[in-house]
Amino acid sequence: MLDRKIVYVSKGLPQNKLYNGKEFVSGIWKDQTERLVVRSIKIDEDDVANPAYHGGPDRVICAYPFEHYAHWEQKFGQPLAKAAFGENLTLLDMKEDQVCIGDIYQIGETILQVSQGRYPCATINKRNNNNLLLKAVVEMGYTGYFFRVLQEGTIFADSAITQLSAHPKQITVSSIHHLYFHDKSPDPKTLERMLEVEELALPWRKKLLEKQQQ
């Protein structure tokens, strides 16, 4: 039986940072909090720096599996900060191979739907001062994923997680990631099944369509 629960709740506004002597702005730095006030477009007191590639109604809440922290700490021999991947929810028993696009959960007062896996970028390296991390994240598929908001509300640090419905197509976040990044000759029927999931967010739908046309 799954023991889904919140480990950390985090939020933060974009900050100016220095990396290798160069300034950049990012919202990946998050601080622990006792609650998230979740709106349909964004979380109060939480934002992204580059709305062209982050945020929006299909990417309101970023989630990351807590289990992966032990893997990364063992692999690189150094501890990670909480919310090291810029996630709002650090979750237990909700890994990428355990959640499917279109699955619906109640977390606290909110009702959320899994919309897409995360497309990781080099900011992960900057956040953790580790130039090898992004490549390893892509290799393993330990990316985390996003929720869209079906019902606004507040998520508390001790809020329960209840799955309200499982999407009938059962396309996991992990399966889409591995097909896109690692499968040089994907099965056309598998690709078609993924594209049939209407709840898949547009950026990833476009990526799969590009894959289909290769």
Image (cartoon, rainbow, N blue to C red):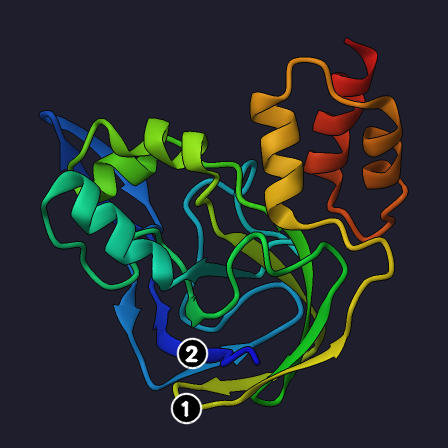
Q: In this view, does 62 lie to the left or right of 197?
A: left
Query: Residue 17, position in %: x, y?
Result: 18, 41
Q: Is mark 1 on a helix, strand or loop?
A: loop
| Residue type indicated by callout 1 | Asp
Query: Residue 114, position in %: x, y?
Result: 67, 60
Q: How far apart are marks 2 and 1 (CA)?
A: 7 Å
Q: In this view, does 54 lie to the left or right of 139?
A: right
Instruction: Answer above or below: position of 42 versus 76.
Output: below
Residue with the mark numbered 1? 158
> Looking at the image, which is closer to me, 40 or 93?
93
Residue with the mark numbered 2? 6
Query: Residue 152, position in %: x, y?
Result: 66, 80
Instruction: Answer above or below: position of 212 versus 94.
Output: above
| Residue type indicated by callout 2 | Ile
Query: Residue 188, position in %: x, y?
Result: 86, 23
Q: Is mark 2 on a helix, strand or loop?
A: strand
Q: Is residue 55 left or right of residue 27?
A: right
Quadrant of residue 127 within the rendered picture: top left
Please identify the quadrant where the N terminus is shown.
bottom right
Mark 2 vs 1: CB contact within 8 A? yes
